[in-house]
């Protein structure tokens, strides 16, 4: 099965707003569907390294927390 790749413009490195509007457009066009976001999440050795990594994953999890029909899956990667 082939899936299209969608590239979203993100001014000023904003991630949550363009992705949220893209997902909302999909859900409005197809209301009986589910959207799954698969994101890498870094697992670091030191606890203070967490402040440098995973901020994007945390932002997107918070953005889609109360959004119906959206599943956010984090895939851990050890650094």
Image: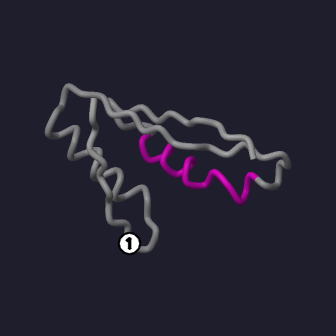
Tag count? 1
Q: Is residue 37 above or below residue 54?
A: above
Q: Residue furthest right?
A: 46
- In the rendered view, does 58 fall on the left or right side of 79? left
Q: Secondary structure at mark 1?
A: helix
Residue 62 among those drawn in magenta: yes
- Name the residue located 25 percent from the left edge and 45 percent from the top edge: 24
In this picture the colour scheme is one colour
Q: Is residue 56 above or below residue 73?
A: below
Residue 62: x %, y % from top left: 50, 45
Residue 61: x %, y % from top left: 50, 43
Residue 40 among those drawn in magenta: no
Q: Is residue 69 above or below residue 28?
A: above
Q: Nearer the viewer, residue 65 or 45?
A: 45
- Name the residue located 21 percent from the left edge and 46 percent from the top edge: 25
- Name the residue located 51 percent from the left edge and 42 percent from the top edge: 39
Q: Nearer the viewer, residue 5 or 65?
A: 5
- In the rendered view, does 16 fall on the left or right side of 7? right
- Name the residue located 32 percent from the left edge and 65 percent from the top edge: 9
Q: Which residues are magenta?
A: 50-64
Q: Which residue is mark 1?
A: 11
């Amino acid at each position: 099965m082939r899936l299209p790749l969608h590239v979203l413009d993100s001014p000023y490195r904003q991630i949550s707003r363009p992705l949220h509007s893209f997902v909302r457009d999909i859900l409005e066009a197809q209301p009986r569907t589910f959207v799954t976001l698969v994101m890498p999440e870094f697992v670091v050795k030191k606890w203070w390294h967490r402040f440098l990594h995973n901020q994007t994953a945390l932002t997107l999890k918070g953005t889609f927390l109360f959004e119906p029909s959206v599943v956010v899956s984090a895939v851990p990667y050890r650094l």
